[in-house]
Amino acid sequence: MTEQQEKQPYRVLLFYKYVHIDNPEEFAAEHLAWCKENGLRGRVLIAKEGLNGTVSGTVAQTEAYMKQLTSDPRFSDVEFKIDPAEHHVFRKMFVRARKEIVTWRLEDDVDPSQVTGRHLKPKEWKEALERDDVIVIDGRNDYEYDIGHFKGALRPEVKTTKEFPEWVRQNLAEHKDKKILMYCTGGIRCEKFSGFMLQEGFQDVNQLEGGIIKYSKDPEVQGDLFEGKCYVFDERIAVPINQKEDKVIAHCHHCGKPEDRYVNCANPFCHLQHVCCEECEVTHRRSCSDECREHPANRYDLDNEILRKREEEYRLEKEQALHSEHSPS
């Protein structure tokens, strides 16, 4: 992390914990009220099996959040992945009760506290990646893979997590004796995914502890062997991982030049997320096709006006955060 990043007034927290929660609805309501009262924004999912969340706030707000959450014995050992940010990366705060904190819908559900793959530290992961006798699985969706992934990883032909069991059965059933390496953004998807593969009869299943985000911050590996950027589910869309080589692997949907920025099609009836360079975004009015560009409901101009107002809001919030940080208590 650079000195400039360390001085950013905001932070983004990524975290999860598989642990029993008796009343998810009640916990979610109380958690939402606390977050709103303390200025946090983001998304937190609560289920009987645990919680899964990412929030943004000022340094003080995120410190208060971590202190509040870990004061509960159920979450005392939660590991937070922390990224610096110039401003909030979410517009609102949502805390919702769900059946699962990651939507797997497995026929035979997995309890990660009972069965899960072997967790590999960043150095162990890098050493394993460099072997020739391993199968590396990207435990994310295909569009996440397309802008960044570990060298040699298989690209999953899935749009949602619940499609993985069928994908594994169709593509890997003959390799149950091979050493399996799997990874995801922050580690949570691999907890059940690795357990599922063990139940399917795979003998040597390993997962990257803390996911791509933790790997990027390790001072020894420095994100090495990850190519491209990591997709994140907030306004940043993608974040750099490899501190040794910032390689762009995706290409602009329109002109084909190397690019790794995703945009959503400005036609609200399409909204296709696609890779687009800044020049083509203007030329094609942030649209994925000529049809969408010429559609009467195209929101390109309206969205740009909203974006300008949002940037001004963020500028004012940042000034206020910096002022509060340097004001005497």
Image (cartoon, rainbow, N blue to C red):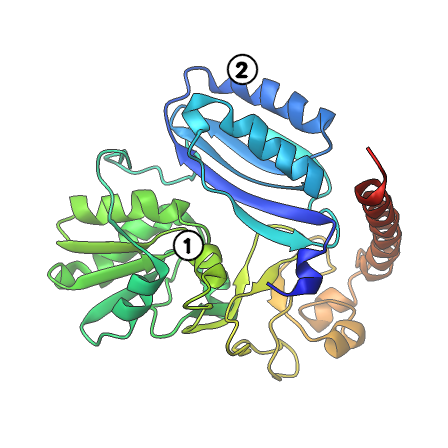
Instruction: Please tell me whether mark 1 sits on a helix, a strand or a loop.
Output: helix
52 above or below 193?
Answer: above
Which residue is more in the foreground, 91 or 84? Answer: 84
Where does label 2 land, which residue? 26
- First of labels 2, 1 by sequence position: 2
| Image depth: mark 2 or mark 1 in front | 1
Which residue is more in the foreground, 313 or 110? Answer: 313
| Quadrant position of the C terminus in the picture | top right
Where does label 1 land, which residue? 211
Instruction: Please tell me whether mark 2 sits on a helix, a strand or a loop.
Output: helix
149 above or below 264?
Answer: below
Q: Picture coordinates of residue 19 (x, y %)?
A: 37, 28
Q: Picture coordinates of residue 42 (x, y %)?
A: 64, 39
Q: Is residue 245 left or right of residue 129?
A: right
At a point 57% along the width and 30% down the height, the residue shown is 67
Residue 264, visible in the rendered structure: no
| Quadrant position of the N terminus in the picture | bottom right
At a point 54% along the width and 76% down the height, the residue shown is 250
Q: Picture coordinates of residue 13 (x, y %)?
A: 58, 44
Q: Report, in whole angstroms, how far the alpha carbon at label 2 lies from the one at label 1.
A: 30 Å
109 above or below 188?
Answer: above
Q: Picture coordinates of residue 43 (x, y %)?
A: 59, 37
At a point 61% along the width and 66% down the height, the residue shown is 274
Indicate which disc residue 236 carries.
none
What amino acid is found at the position of numbered circle 2 in the picture?
Glu
Label 1, residues with CA under 10 Å away: few <14, some 14-19, many ≥20: many
Using the rendered view, name the quadrant where residue 84 is placed. bottom right
At a point 44% along the width and 29% down the height, the residue shown is 76
Q: Is residue 303 left or right of residue 272?
A: right
What amino acid is found at the position of numbered circle 1 in the picture?
Gly
